[in-house]
Image (spheres, helix red, strand yellow):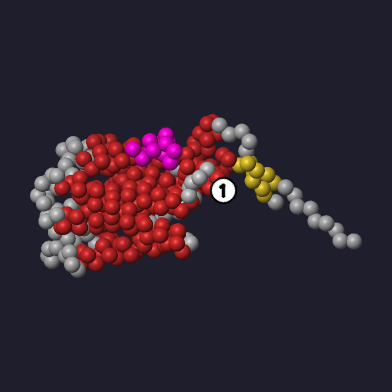
Amino acid sequence: MIQLELRQNTNWWTSLRSILLALLITAAFSVAVLFVMSDRPADAIWQMLSFPWQGRRMEVQFGLVLQQSAYLAVIALGLSVGYRANIWNIGAEGQFAFGSIGAYAAYLLMGSPDSGWAFPALLLAGIIGGCLWAMIPAFLRVTCNTNELLTSLMLVYVASHLLTYLCIGPLKGDPKAGQAETYPIAESVQASKLISGTELHTGLLVLFVAFIILAAILLFTLLGYRLKVAQHTPRAERFAGFSPNNTVWLSFAISGAMAGLAGAVYLTAETGKLIQAENYLENFGFAAIIIAFLGRLHPVGILLAALMISYVNVGASYIQASLQVDDSVAELIEVVALFAFLGCAVLDQYTVKFKRTTTRKVA
């Protein structure tokens, strides 16, 4: 019989050891997959590791990595707020979509302004949109005791279908476009480039500031302590005077707001318009769930995990174009990394014991 016994003495070395082991497992699996999927596995491995120095300019490649990691880190940190308190919001993809919808709706309601002052207003509208959409599963959890895993996930598909409906229906733009999309917002309202020729823009600075503020709140304020208490000793949350229902509301509000902010930045900086869901949503919300757990729900870990996964994703896209290797290998590596990190985290906290089961003889 296999039993898990809680380790009495854990320190930074045991945590570091488990992280290094998970990285080693992920790297070994990645190499094995590329050997199977590529006719030139050595080239594929080398190009995936060194793609920033190949083909396009290095600042362009690193810009793509930073761009993707910014969205992932912000959404993942928002999700970690609830996960710390055992509240499971897995609908960030829908909240991301509603952040974009809210930002575009605000642009129309303001009369399609052609001035940069509207940019922060659109970001605020995105935050509100994502937050309001996240309040639905929170309301159902608090009032009806429904499972927030199911409700938040189902609302992702509602949001994606609504996004597509708006693009093919009331907000439909140029009918000659090759896809269903809205008319673009004015260029003066869109995020401006930080470095010419790269994907770096002012929206990434907004996401970075939001990440730093929320990380500081989680690490150094009563809210962070409250969530830690709710995670490890839920009963103590009541004794400490914290309301579990208020924790649900707060967790969904913060995670929805962060996903909505990312959606608003994506609209104003990447596309400039709403597009049908299959061509607009990049699965940032779902990938952020993996990022949150890879980072052990800690802001520093989440940031490092977002950078690692973004590097893999951009590298996979690069070798897909140069060597015709299916870029879905990146998604496979993400899943393996998640299981490796979670498995090693369990071994970090617990010792595996093998015990014999004895059967009593009946006289």
- How many labels were placed on the picture? 1
Instruction: Please identify the residue farthest to the bottom as the structure is shown.
Output: 169
Residue ID at (36%, 48%): 254
The quarter of the picture where residue 194 lies is: top left
Vertical order, 286 against 220 (above or below): below
Please tell me which residue lies in front, 246 or 68: 246
- Asked which quadrant contains residue 53, the reply is top left
Q: Which residue is mark 1?
A: 235
Q: Is 65 inside the magenta-drawn segment? A: no
The answer to whether 189 appears left or right of 159 in the picture is left
Assess whether residue 218 is covered by the magenta stretch: yes
- Magenta-drawn stretch, dominant element (helix, strand or loop): helix
Residue 121 shows up from this direction: yes
The spot of residue 20 in percent (x, y) is: 49, 36
Q: Where, quadrant-wise, is the C terminus in this rendering?
A: bottom right
Residue 317 visible somewhere in the drawing: no
What segment is highlighted magenta in the picture? 213-223
What residue is shown at x 13% (from left), y 66% (from top)?
175
The kind of residue tagged 1 is Arg
Q: Residue furthest front?
A: 241
Reply above or below: 32 against 98: above
Residue 100 screen position, x and y as percent: 25, 54
Counting from the top left corner in percent of width and height, residue 92 is at 36, 54
| Residue at (23, 43) in percent of width and height | 203
